[in-house]
Image: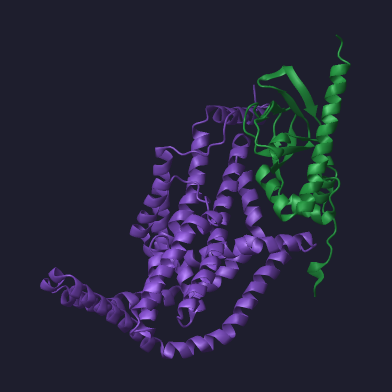
Amino acid sequence: MFAFLKRQPERPRIAQIRRLTLFATLGQRELRVVDGLLHDRHYLRDEIVFDQGEEGQALYVVLSGSVLICRQGEPVAGRIAVIAAGTPFGELALLENVPRAAQARAAEDCVLAALSRADFTRLFETHGAIASKIALQLARDLGQKLVARHVAMESRPL
Amino acid sequence: MKKTPSGFGPLTWLTTIVITTLLLVAATKALWLVVPFLLAIILYYLLYPIVLRLILGGVAREAAAALVAGGVTVLAVAIMIPLVPWLIAQSVSGEETLFRYLEGGRVLIDRTLLALESQFAFLKRLDFHAEMSRKATEFGNVFVQKQLADALNGAATWLPSLLLAPFFAFFFLRDGRQFVTLLLNEVPNAFFERTIYMVDRVNATARNYFQGLLKLTVIDSLLLAFGLWLIGIPGALLLGVIAAIFEWVPVVGMILGCVLVVLVAAADFPNDPWVVYAVVALFVAVRMLDNFLFIPLTIGRSIQMHPLPTVLMVFIGGAVAGVAGLILALPLAGVVSAVVGTAAGIVYDPRLRARNRFAKALQLRRATADLSP
């Protein structure tokens, strides 16, 4: 009679989210809560995700394809990084109400999952444990990006 | 930095006022639908945290929504079962009680006018007491025979539709998020972040307003009940709750609540005018506490509009849609202003529109790639 209350098998969508580094530490139930907050967006190659200087309202995770991070309007000369599938970008907008530091545009056709700042902030109020786990993963990701950038600058020829 | 729009110019104010007024006029035509819809929204914001807890506990969203909405319906029925016979018993003596309170009010006015005449001779020369008494009697007759009867008939017509409230609340709880997702799916990528900002503002406005309103009602109920109990008014808790609910009507709600309790006090304590004065003083004190302490702490700045269009909207709401307009004007104007503000932000941002045109051109190029001769 109460079969509808029983644990449900992991859906392909949940399995897809679990593979993303940002949500890797979440349990299945927690992933279902997060799934309800994510918005999938489809971008064509060269389409702009956000502009440098724009007020950010969401963080993105690349589900498929890749995204180019560059200086505003300089996709070749101003190239900063290419974000591969499974990696988040635009995370500073989630932590603080700051302008986007660079432009993001689709390097190829891609699908992105967006998590809005408002939903993330509310997650801290309603599901503190989930929000803390995401924040910890975010901090790890930012740390790795910082180290990679530092190493890249150190190894640059003088 | 290109700021997401939060400020409003005169044109957006005007658009907000016009759209809100049209929506209020439409609301008056379908009050039987608007009232349960409004209650369902309040229920949604009250029950949504419980649904989230259940989802985290492993229950599927659909089942969680059904459990919570069903639980509230069962609880409401359980409360109504003993309450209905009591209400029917009360309604038998209801008419007698109503006339007793109206008579109490008439006597109070009568005595106050006589006291005024004895103080001011010019009032006596104008025959102020007789004239005002005649007008009060006329108003009383019209009020009971026409307005009160019409109001009761109207309420009886749409009262069964209140059963729609838990039904609506269930669908809001189950599909509310899906509705937002469907809405956002229709939005072009260029406007996506502006739209999630708008959705959040609409959600925050409605949630903060209705949750704040409920908190304010509880605080005012307790304060008024305690004060009335100290004064010695019978049924202090019930009167406190009713007067606090009257405050859902901005501006005039508190006055109506005060008049109601004054009528009870005047009828129950006909020879003690100080009880009436104490009641009025209590309502003034609670109003001041509300204005300076409780409203900022509860409803606060949930309606992010300038005070001028806000007050204007309340009066327009009352003029075009009566009591329903007074109650709905502020939350509706808050929601409409969020939508209009976002739309204006997109219309006035050439970069966003250019990005949208660019995305469309990319789509067109992709769609026609193999069609060139």
Q: Is residue B227 above or below residue A103?
A: below
Residue A85 shows in this picture? no
Residue B293 left/right relative to B125: right
- Rendering coords of residue B169 (x, y %): 60, 65
Residue A14 left/right relative to B326: right
Q: Residue at x 58, y 51 (%)?
A: B204
Q: Is residue A18 above or below residue A126?
A: above
Q: Quadrant of the C terminus of chain A?
A: top right
Residue A6 lies in what quarter of the image? bottom right
Residue B151 lies in what quarter of the image? bottom left
Residue B296 left/right relative to B57: left
Q: Is residue B207 above or below residue B339?
A: below
Q: Residue at x 58, y 87 (%)?
A: B82
Q: Nearer the viewer, residue B350 or A21?
A: A21
Q: Colour of chain A?
A: green
Residue B103 shows in this picture? yes
- Rendering coords of residue A106 (x, y %): 72, 29
Q: Colour of chain B?
A: purple
Q: Quadrant of the N terminus of chain A?
A: bottom right
- Rendering coords of residue B241 (x, y %): 50, 73
Return the residue found at the far front.
B119
The tally of labels here is 0
Q: Nearer the viewer, residue B93 or B72?
A: B93
Question: How is the model colour-coded?
Answer: by chain
Q: Is residue B128 above or below residue B359?
A: below
Residue A79 lies in what quarter of the image? top right
Q: Residue at x 34, y 76 (%)?
A: B148
- Rendering coords of residue A119 (x, y %): 68, 48
Q: Residue at x 88, y 22 (%)?
A: A151
Return the residue found at the far left.
B125
